[in-house]
Image (cartoon, helix red, strand yellow):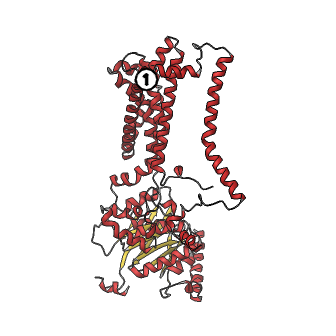
Amino acid sequence: MTAMAHTSMQTDPNPAIVSLKGISKTFSNGTVALNNMSLDIRQGEFVSLLGPSGCGKSTALRIVTGLTGPTSGRVEWPQETAGATEHELSFVFQEPTLMPWATVFANVWLPLRLKGISQRQAHDSVMEALEMVSLAEFAKSYPRELSGGMKMRVSIARALVTKPKLLLMDEPFAALDEITRFKLNNDLLHLWETFGWTVVFVTHSVFESVYLSDRIVVMAARPGRVVNDMAIDAPYPRDESFRTSAVYSGFCRDVSQALHAAMDAGDDM
Amino acid sequence: MTVALSDKADPAKTSYAAPIDAAPLDEEELKRARAARIESIGRWVVPLAILVLSVWLWDRICIWNEIPHYILPRPGLVFETLLIDWPILWVALLNTLKITFGALFIATAGGLGLAVLFTQSKWIEISFFPFAVILQVTPIIAIAPLILIYVDSLTASLLICAWIVAFFPILSNTVLGLNSADHNLRNLFQLYGASRWQTLRYLRLPAAMPYFLGGLKIAGGLSLIGAIVAEFVAGSAGSGSGLANQILEASYRLNMPRMFAALLMISVTGILIFLTMNLLSHLLLRKWHESALKREV
């Protein structure tokens, strides 16, 4: 991570990769999903957006991708030249969202295929991405032949195949059982440490967010807004021993309190 | 034992590792194997036996009630007529098939093309969908005489009639299919900057495939019905006349056995079309779609 900071042109050792500036979003039915949200995501961070349902955390993520536009405010990409329409980001949905008619290989190839890269040219990148999630031997399988956790790993491989700078994940492991979720948590952390991307991770689990992130942004609902921005400065690499440590429980307690405060604040509105 | 274990670890082999040819181990397993065998044979034998029984009953009813052959011919006579009249009926069948498959082809191309067009532009859909509905809800037998008057070529008018009947299920099913692509996948395509054509080619058309094939199954039967109905309305004999004309002509002469023979050929053609469509659908979907997967019981 420090190596990356040095190569950066910015004077700030940890420059923002994307900035939300006073974002508000009101849906057509009048619901205020986000109210004046400002947030800097700095390069190399693992940020979790944590909050009760309806706090607009998924909406914030969709606004970053550009799939949804904000009602007011703007999204800035300080490191990109002005006017760039495509950002080097990938998105992982809560569902695996694979094409059932295509093999695992073809599913992971999709982002490259859409950029006009042929199957032969893409082969190495696709296999490399599948290798990262240990699914290389399943390249020719169809999604229906895989378990839920494996499908999610294919989905992650598809997000990684473009080598994005920013990885956005919308409750990616919420539908999985605990054993699989722990394993994928470890895999994800390992990949993040190895490749030094920036990750924004939406979750409603205190324990998951503390385990993974070095920064947790706590949000409250009605209207959706940021109420707390907490650093989790436990060292990486983290593993199962961290999950059972006193430091970990300490952070979990603090974050839980912050979350409860956020929920109470939401109820008052 | 070690071999069996390593087999289990290999994901490619597990699905084929069912012990079909392994020697049965106990009474229980033997019983299950026997039940499976009976089931697989019975699947064919029972419906076939029922069919043979009903034909036999048809024959007996003719005998018991002394029904004359110009009212209800015995199955043997129908079969005999089929052989004797084969040259006439075969030519008629070919003519009917020409209309049926011609109409099915145009209906498929037209239905698919219109469906793609409809989903590309909301305004095209809003403007033209009512016409498709009007064509669909107006009974073909009521429009056919008009078409026969306006269109000079008999073949062309028969094709138009059969096409009108057959194309709507393909159109409506494909429109439904093209619109039912997963929303998250659509977002993903948008995120990666997919063009309209790429989204159609890689997402919406594959997603529409099961719906399209469902429409094609219905259209296959309907194009045969459309062809027969159009022939009935046209009613002309002579060159280019199909099976319906044979039935009409035979009915004027009270040639019951030939009517039944022609009817039998129409039914068999319909069944063959249905089976072909089923096979096509299975081949295209067997790898991924729920409808084509074998469930483990």
Residue A258, horizontal then vertical, whole percent: 57, 79
Query: Residue lying farthest top?
Result: B253
Q: Is residue B236 above or below residue B2?
A: above
Query: As rendered, which of A42 and A38 lies closer to the eye?
Result: A42
Query: Residue lying farthest front?
Result: B23
Q: Is residue B265 above or below residue A197?
A: above
- Image side of residue B153 versus residue B266, left or right: left
Three-letter code, disc 1: Ala
Residue A204, horizontal then vertical, whole percent: 55, 71
**Which residue position holds label 1?**
B230
Query: Residue lying farthest right?
Result: B27
Quadrant assignment for the N terminus of chain A? bottom left
Residue B46, horizontal then vertical, whole percent: 64, 38
Q: Which residue is pictured at 70% across the width and 54% down the height?
A: B31
> Does the image show residue B106?
yes
Residue B228's image quarter? top left
> Does the image show residue A54?
no
Query: As rendered, which of A257 and A201 lies closer to the eye?
Result: A201
Query: As rendered, which of B49 and B236 lies closer to the eye?
Result: B49
Q: Residues within 10 Å of mark 1 (few under 14, many from 20)?
A: many
Disc 1 is attached to a residue of which chain? B
